[in-house]
Image (tube, helix red, strand yellow):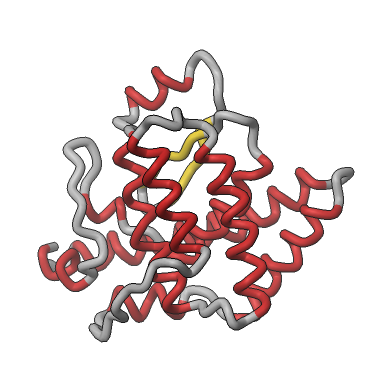
Amino acid sequence: MNDLLTSYSLYSLYSETKSEKNLILDPMSCLIRLCLLQYKDKGTKLSVEQNRVSYQEPGLSQPMFRSLRGDCREDLHNLCNPLLQCIEWYPKENAVHEYLYGECRKGLMVLKNAYSTESTIHHTITHYISIIDGEVVTEKKSEENPLITHLQSLWSMAEIRVVHDLLRIINENTVDRESYIRSVCEIVSQKEYHTHEYIENMSTKY
């Protein structure tokens, strides 16, 4: 297990209620989840578990639900490294990638508005927007390992284009929007499932 975690050094945060391996996120799936956040109800928050990002709709049950699942604001810190990795793996010079970053920025703005302007997490999300805007310069990682290879090969360019096209339809089509959103969520869910299974299988080898 230590080899698995240290080899993917971008993810070193530890949670008492969630194991470290479950905090590892596929960068592209994370980016797309954030893109869709703009279409969720105001006040929707995020949770990270089993290598996926999930939405928690606003309501009276949201605080209790988050408490029972061990969710907290620290979960959002696990979005930083996937976003940094996206910038490295999916350059903005590509028009498809650039559109996804623009939609992600909209989602982050919605998320930002779910928190008090005086809160730490509000400033954290502002930092994430700076990452998406290309204002944060980071050193590229040269390490290679099975997990990095898996995540880099998880999405083909053809699949990314499909999601890009669906997001454009979602943005322009209000009549059947929910159907297209479900389609994108299903695609991402499959990628998240493959990532979770891969990490689970790898962890049994150590």
Residue at the location (25% across, 81% down)? 145
Depth check: give the residue in front, 48 or 137.
137
Q: Position of residue 154 (x, y in %)?
A: 47, 74
Taking 20 as reference, is 11 above or below it? below
Residue at the location (54% across, 35% down)? 113
136 relative to 12 in the view: left or right: right
Residue at the location (31% across, 81% down)? 140
**Quadrant of the frame with the N terminus:** bottom left
98 relative to 176 in the view: left or right: left
**Quadrant of the frame with the C terminus:** bottom left
Q: Position of residue 69 (x, y in %)?
A: 34, 30
- What is the tally of numbered marks visible in this picture? 0
Depth check: give the residue in front, 201 or 34.
34
Q: Position of residue 3 (x, y in %)?
A: 13, 70
Q: Which residue is situated farthest in the top direction here?
A: 60
Taking 16 as reference, is 194 above or below it? below
Taking 153 as reference, is 50 above or below it? above
Q: Which residue is situated farthest in the right direction here?
A: 175
Residue at the location (32% across, 48% down)? 77
Using the rendered view, name the quadrant where residue 24 is placed: bottom left
28 relative to 81 in the view: left or right: right
Q: Position of residue 184 (x, y in %)?
A: 66, 56
